[in-house]
Image (cartoon, helix red, strand yellow):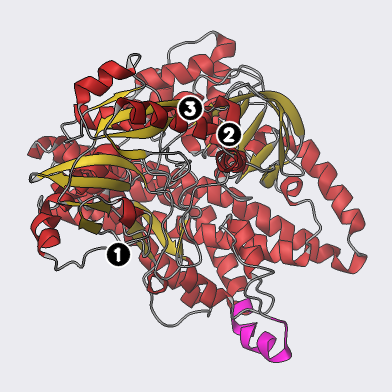
Amino acid sequence: MAGGKAHTLAEMQRAGFCVPEFVCSPPDLEQAFNALGTPLVVRSSASAEDGSHASFAGLFHSCLNLRSFAEVARAVARCRASVAEPAVVEYCRKQGIDPRSVHMDVIVQRMVQPELAGVAFTVNPITGADEIVIEACEGLADALLAGRAPALPRDHPLVVRYAPEIERVARRLHWHFGAPQDIEFAIEGGTLFIVQSRPITRIGFAPEVGEWTNADFRDGGVSSTVCTPLMWSLYDFIWEDALKGFLREIKLFDGDFQAGRMFFGRPYWNLGAVKRCLMKLPGFVEREFDNDLSVHINYQGDGIRTPFTLGGVARALPTILAIESVWKRQERFDRAFLAAGFDALVKPFEETPAKPEASLAELIQDAYRITESNYFRTIYCASLAKLDFKDSFPDADYPALVGGLPPMRHLEPGGAMRAMALRGDTDVTPLLDRFRHHSRRELDIRAPRWDEDRAWVEQLFERSSTADGLDPRQLYEAARSEAIARVPWHKRRAFDRKLDRLRRFIWLREEMRDLSSRMYYLIRRRVLQIAERRGLGDDIFFMTFREILNDDRSTIAGSREIYDSYRNFDAPHEIGSRFAFAEPATAGALTGIPASPGAVRGVAHVARTVEEAMRLEKGAILVCLFTDPGWTVLLDRAAGVVTETGGLLSHAAVICREYGIPAVLGVPGATRRIPDGSTIAIDGTAGRVDLLIEPRLFPAACA
């Protein structure tokens, strides 16, 4: 059975949804005609149709109300021929699909004679609201779908009668497919038939929603996939106060706003509110801010720009002085915390508690709050240090200048595995103890940690590289010497001071992230202990930490439904009226952020999960959505890295620079646009990826 539409119809039938009888590309058309009866409809089922990234909506021919065999035969021929029409070829070109690879099958289906028919959207496509939108009319819906007839009002008796059932089935379809659905339905004899269900490929947002982003959250973080209520409740507990508290501390904010919220089962932070704070600073350029965070840009020019004026500088002076003070305080705290403060803080929580609920409450309110708040503050300090350096020295080779950092804890597992291999030691038990807090997905508290996942660590050890990587300090020292030579003599002290501060905070941020991972390890231990006592199993992750402490299980079922309903959805990175979510472009140049210098040519290994990345061959180029600390050991095998998310300060950028491998980050749709096994060249200095050898068939064309 070929094509997205036929595949979906068959899947819905197997799942128990009412679908009108059909056959796909029957070998004996006349026999199918006689078996199905009349009237019939002939519909397209192309190999790339109705996918999550390419819908081909309205491009292929469908024929309704066919009552003779001759009509059906002509309709089948016309439907097959529509694959070569100019509009289809142009759409393929825009989507990066080889038109020759699109295969057309046809659906011959019994035509329902409805009393009510129409469409239902499981997310409002205009406002982005999480609500069912129904548009229906009496009889056939072809005129409604073509825009030639209006929808019935919500209070029409037929709509009132059938809306509850339409909404119930629509939610079931949303849950079944794990993504928002665009559903065509028809009601005949009181039975709701599903004629089609496909992913919604375009969603707008109402202006009152504001502007939100998952930048930084998505780069291996809490928004890289659907987030559980427990994980978001922990993150939000810190984020809500840390972000606003930091902005108050640097004199940019004295009011209130909601710092974070969930959309489509994923966390986002308030981009609009943060920009309103930062635009008070002279020299703020919205485009530069968005570029640094890989926020989607859909405006002309620089966007919001705050000019340098004497009055503006005077008003910003308290902020400038406050930032200098914050940098000093945060660095002092972090160094003391890393040296001994964290170990002393968590020592009381190392043993298994007799009363895990009380221990969890104390851990979150005390040790977790201190650790995670200061981790976030270090992230903010690193971002400000980067902006300060880049504003002062915009022509400096930033990626080369921030490589060669002091030894980092994230790299220790790889080093330990190399040492074991050299000794001929294969027992990973010491790794499970020393690095117990690591995980395949470190910001997914559901994921087992290394001391629970021995088989995974054994695989990592077997696949780990035995050779030391390139020394990035040589490249860094050469780049620094070259950069200093180009800086006027009177700016060299400022160059050294600002670069050194930036390098310190990048290193501190990575070290504090390791402490954050250790904290989530301790929290997970207590959560599992409570789950075992109460017989909750996996349900405990679908409770907030406050619900766990109060043993409130009332929201578990609803939280699971939300989680499952968005599990397959490639959610938009930005939310807001300026950021309409649409089918991602797959054609055009492959460009991104030059995050780690150097150039390399090799075979692309496309991996959407860390499990798929495990199969990475030594010397291949890893193409992935993102990386997090759980991927670090695997990156040592790569000759280069391409990601869809991440910026200059991301974990992938830092680790690739330390391994001395080229990296281009933030390449839109990289895992779909680069075929697995193709030969590519990446330039981590220019931020360019070239596809050198293209396979005959693009994966995007095979839905």
Q: Quadrant of the C terminus?
A: top left
Residue drawn at x 59%, y 81% is 280
Q: Tell me the amino acid under the disc marked 1.
A: Pro
Q: Secondary structure at mark 2?
A: loop
Asked if residue 548 can be seen in this view, the reply is no
Residue drawn at x 22%, y 53% is 544
User: Where residue 183 sits: x, y (%)?
Assistant: 28, 46
Residue drawn at x 70%, y 33% is 660
- 295 relative position to 241: left or right: right
- Residue 150 disc label: 1
Q: Tell me the amino acid under the disc marked 2.
A: Ile
- CA distance for labels 1 and 2: 35 Å
Residue 313 among those drawn in magenta: yes
Q: Tell me the amino acid under the disc marked 3.
A: Cys
- Range of the magenta residues? 307-320
User: Which residue is disc 2 drawn over?
Assistant: 97
> Which badge, 2 or 3, is on the more N-terminal residue?
2
> Which badge, 1 or 2, is on the more N-terminal residue?
2
Q: Secondary structure at mark 1?
A: loop
Q: Secondary structure at mark 3?
A: loop
User: Where residue 126 sits: x, y (%)?
Assistant: 38, 63
Residue drawn at x 41%, y 58% is 268
Q: Nearer the viewer, residue 690 or 551?
A: 690
User: Which residue is disc 3 drawn over?
Assistant: 702
Asked if residue 483 can be seen in this view, the reply is yes
